[in-house]
Amino acid sequence: MHIALTGATGFLGSRLLVQFLRRGAEVTVLARPRPRGAGERLATVLAASGAPGSLLDRLHRRVHVVEADMSLPRLGLSPVHFQELADRADAVWHCAGDIRLNADLAGLRAVNVHGIRQMLAFTAAGRRVPRFHHVSTAFVAGARREGTAYEHELTDAHGFENAYEQSKYEAELLVHAWARQQHRPAVIFRPSILVGDRPPHPDVPGHPLQYIGEVARSAREAAAAGGLELPPGERPLVRIAGRADGHLNLLPVDWAAEAMVRLAERCPGTDVSTFHVVHPRDTPMAVLVRLLERLFPVRLELQDADVAVSDATELERTADFYPGFTPYLRHRRRFDDTAARRLLGPLPPPPDVDLPYLVAGTDPAAHDAARPRTSR
Ligand SMILES: NC(=O)c1ccc[n+]([C@@H]2O[C@H](COP(=O)([O-])OP(=O)(O)OC[C@H]3O[C@@H](n4cnc5c(N)ncnc54)[C@H](OP(=O)(O)O)[C@@H]3O)[C@@H](O)[C@H]2O)c1
């Protein structure tokens, strides 16, 4: 089996690559050459994510790294090279994406929409008629904050919390249009928010909550540099819009990668098949609030409505831990994953994403504390 994979240098794609190597596949990795060579970055990411030596060995023998950019026509490849690579693939997995929740739509479309067009053209060109696998997100469900989102739904009727969600929604529409025009099957995976319990590492791409941890560290350093440190023990109150009874679906990334590859193996694939790849138990908002309170020296209070502007303190007016993410504090939506569960079979459930798990994955200082490892 020869797989063409994008996004392999990323948080999720590196785990998908591990799954493919474990199964003995040959992989063509399509990756950007910057900031260092893609091959060198791949080896660093895999080693730092804890991949065993035997897999690193396979990386050198079974993985062909091709420098390619999703935002360029034909991925920046010559027509001949593009065709040659397309002809090698038995399956195409498109995992590259721009995941900035605070970016504008034009910037996100360059990778998330233009990139998928390039990869669909690549898949259509391949003479082995490869199946297209697209990594979307459960958050294409948009700004509907309550109720249940189903795998068959794809609508913009509720609007979107941020431009990232919209760009991923537009990408899914393109997959459906392509499948109809080409009479080809495709598989769409919609993972929820992916997390890990390994500490942040400078050479390894992080997850969204690690990004919030970085924001907190920079804010603390800037405050210290400006002589604005709070006296020890003093934690100002920050009221922020959110639901104390809310919950979010957070899923360990290694489990997500294994589930996706299993689903692909078991999916009969005659049409477009869409799977929610989600944790069976949501993480309560109270756990996220406690995590944020560990990362930032504040006391957080979630309020049902926006804090009235006249009443808001200076800190509350500027507090936005990660623009684009903060609206999720108002969510209590569930994701139905009936189709995924039906196919997955007896895969052991993922570990609970509780406070110790999240602290281990976001706070390097806390990591030395003895805690059993749950992710591989
Ligand atoms: N993280 C989550 O919580 C989450 C949840 C649901 C769905 N997803 C989806 O999962 C996919 C992977 O996310 P992730 O968390 O692994 O993100 P990530 O760590 O930021 O990785 C993104 C990957 O995309 C590649 N990429 C970005 N722009 C590119 C371009 N112009 N050309 C070629 N490659 C490009 C990156 O390459 P470089 O190494 O060169 O930057 C990297 O390999 C995305 O499609 C995302 O929408 C993520």
Image (cartoon, rainbow, N blue to C red):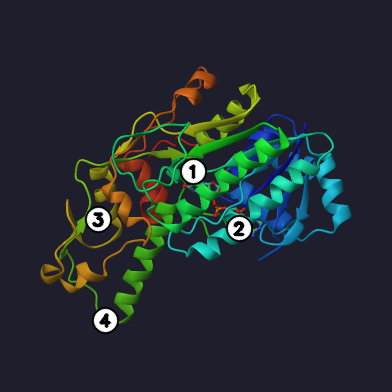
Mark 2: which amino acid?
Answer: Val
Check disc 2: other Cα within 10 Å, few if <14, some if 14-19, many if 20+: many
Residue located at (62% from left, 21% from top): 266
Sequence-earlier tag: 3 or 4:
4
Secondary structure category for the residue under label 2:
helix
Tell me the tag on residue 111: 2
Of tags 1 and 3, the one toward the viewer is: 1
Q: Return the residue at label 4.
A: 227
Of tags 4 and 1, the one toward the viewer is: 1
CA gap between label 4 and label 1 equals 42 Å
Mark 4: which amino acid?
Answer: Gly
Mark 1: which amino acid?
Answer: Thr
Q: Return the residue at label 1.
A: 137
CA gap between label 4 and label 2 equals 41 Å
- Report x, y in % for residue 221: 35, 72
Q: Check whether the beta carbons of the residues at disc 4 and disc 1 lie within 8 A of each other.
A: no
Q: Check whether the beta carbons of the residues at disc 2 and disc 3 lie within 8 A of each other.
A: no
CA gap between label 2 and label 3 equals 34 Å
Q: Nearer the viewer, residue 338 or 278?
A: 338
Q: Nearer the viewer, residue 121 or 72?
A: 121
Of tags 3 and 4, the one toward the viewer is: 3
Mark 2: is the Cβ under 8 angstroms from ligand 1? yes
- Report x, y in % for residue 132: 68, 37
Mark 4: is the Cβ under 8 angstroms from ligand 1? no
Q: Return the residue at label 3.
A: 293
- Report x, y in % for residue 199: 45, 51
